[in-house]
Amino acid sequence: MTEDARASAPTTDEERLAQLGYTQVLARRMSAFSNYAVSFTIISVLSGCMTLYLFGMNTGGPAVITWGWVAVGLMTLVVGLAMAEICSAYPTSAGLYFWAHRLAPPRTAAAWAWFTGWFNVLGQVAVTAGIDFGAASFLGAYLNLQFGFEVTPGRTVLLFAAILLLHGLLNTFGVRIVGLLNSVSVWWHVVGVLVIVGALTFAPDRHRPASFVFGEFVNNTGWSSGPYVVLLGLLMAQYTFTGYDASAHMTEETRDAATAGPQGIVRSIWTSWIAGFVLLLGFTFAIQSYEGALDSPTGAPPAQILLDALGATAGELLLLVIIGAQLFCGLASVTANSRMIYAFSRDGALPFSRVWHTVHPRTRTPVAAVWLAALAALALGLPYLINVTAYAAVTSIAVIGLYIAYVVPTLLRVRKGAAFERGPWHLGRWSRPIGILAVAWVLVITVLFMLPQVSPVTWETFNYAPVAVLVVLGFAATWWLASARHWFLNPDHERTRARATAHANAPEPLDP
């Protein structure tokens, strides 16, 4: 990876944004570290790894948890490198669908952008739902330990709604606080992982042998095929490695965006890869009773592992560290999700777009988009009331939606070849092989995570990820054929829209 001298590049971020067809409306306050912090926070190894640890224990066990993390982390880095190169060329909040539009053949560019954007919206909403639902599950476990709170699907959904409400309010009224919390979150995650792993390493009298951590295979799925279960077990790691496109969606609020954006994507992946590996080893070595953790009354095996290994007081304290990280993660996810909704509706691509791309005149943030992000995530989590495997389905939807959106611009960039105009951060001669490998990996996981996860398949165990994907795809296709193909990203329509947007969102002077 190299960074070229940028003598011929625009002198300001605002000029580059204008070249891409957009007027600077959002406040550009974020540093490169803050941009990285958003993606690192959304990946959140203390959220993804912990909330799907139960899934991993049943679907492959310790061996798949450990080696799956290594393999998936490597392939995710490949996907992230390919995305980062494109982000450098097109640093705008529109992100993936805008990249697709610029990279596709002119006659089909709008269609590529339309469907990429809809998959991105689906994935972003599902990630927000998955993160905050996981936080609700762990909060329920903590309340169970402290106050005897009975954990039921209905109560978990109520906690889920309360967390989404909190994150919506913070993104509405605490804009500067959100930026500060995202930066604090990085250190919370790093220090939290070190403290938890340190405690699990030195406090317990007994640890599992290395043969257990790296070689024990467990299959509680009902499927008889070991290889199939191993592949299903990759979902835990792949779901954790989502949301790093946030660095792209925050570029219109980031200084030196053409370099800071791609760096944020790549750094968030490799630092999370290392932190997650350490965290998973710490928990898996410290398991005192495998069956006891699976059958924990808290409903959260990591909580039971902490209690068994460290005792009630220390275990509950460190459980609070995990819950705090998950709340940070959900907050950042709502922020990034709202920016994607803002950008997509700015191009008229969502129903009632004029509402969703309005910007608050004082805070210069898309408040309506924040609440749409929260409400859509709540709707996606409601099937948990009738489907016991709904959480795994939500995480599958997140992976499928986001990774399709991630890989479409990469596929188009590979097809464009030498005609692609690189930004200051690029892959040089490695661009094509990395792009091809990224596309191949996403094809595999897209098919894989639509498959049934539990046998026998019933209404209670049905993986509804394909249904959600097909509903969104069908809606987007119908709207495209009936109307959007005539106006979406049409230059004449864009000029009219730009004038209307500039008038509606004319910002007040910023505070010094």
Image: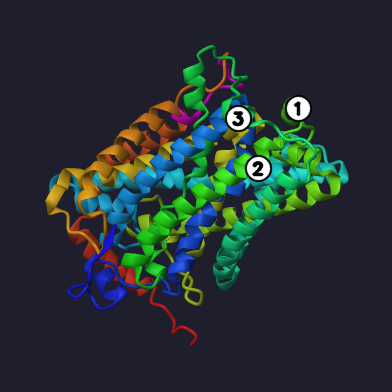
Residue shown at 70% from the left, 54% from the top: 321
**183 or 91: nearer the viewer:** 183
Q: Would you name the residue on which mark 3 appears?
A: 62
Q: Is residue 91 above or below residue 10?
A: above
Q: Would you name the residue on which mark 1 appears?
A: 295
Q: Amino acid at mark 2?
A: Gly
Q: Is residue 22 left or right of residue 391?
A: left
Residue shown at 56% from the left, 42% from the top: 379
Do the CB atoms of the residues marked 2 and 3 lie less than 8 Å apart?
no
In what element is the residue under mark 2? helix
Give the crowd class for mark 1: few <14, some 14-19, many >=20 residues within 10 Å: some
Q: Is tag 2's residue or tag 1's residue first in the polypeptide sequence?
A: 2
Q: CA distance from mark 1 to mark 3?
A: 17 Å
Do the CB atoms of the residues marked 1 and 3 lie less than 8 Å apart?
no
Q: Would you name the residue on which mark 2 appears?
A: 282
Residue 461, magenta (yes or no): yes
Q: Is residue 194 visible?
A: yes
In what element is the residue under mark 3? helix
Q: Residue furthest bottom?
A: 512
Q: Main secondary structure of the magenta part?
A: loop
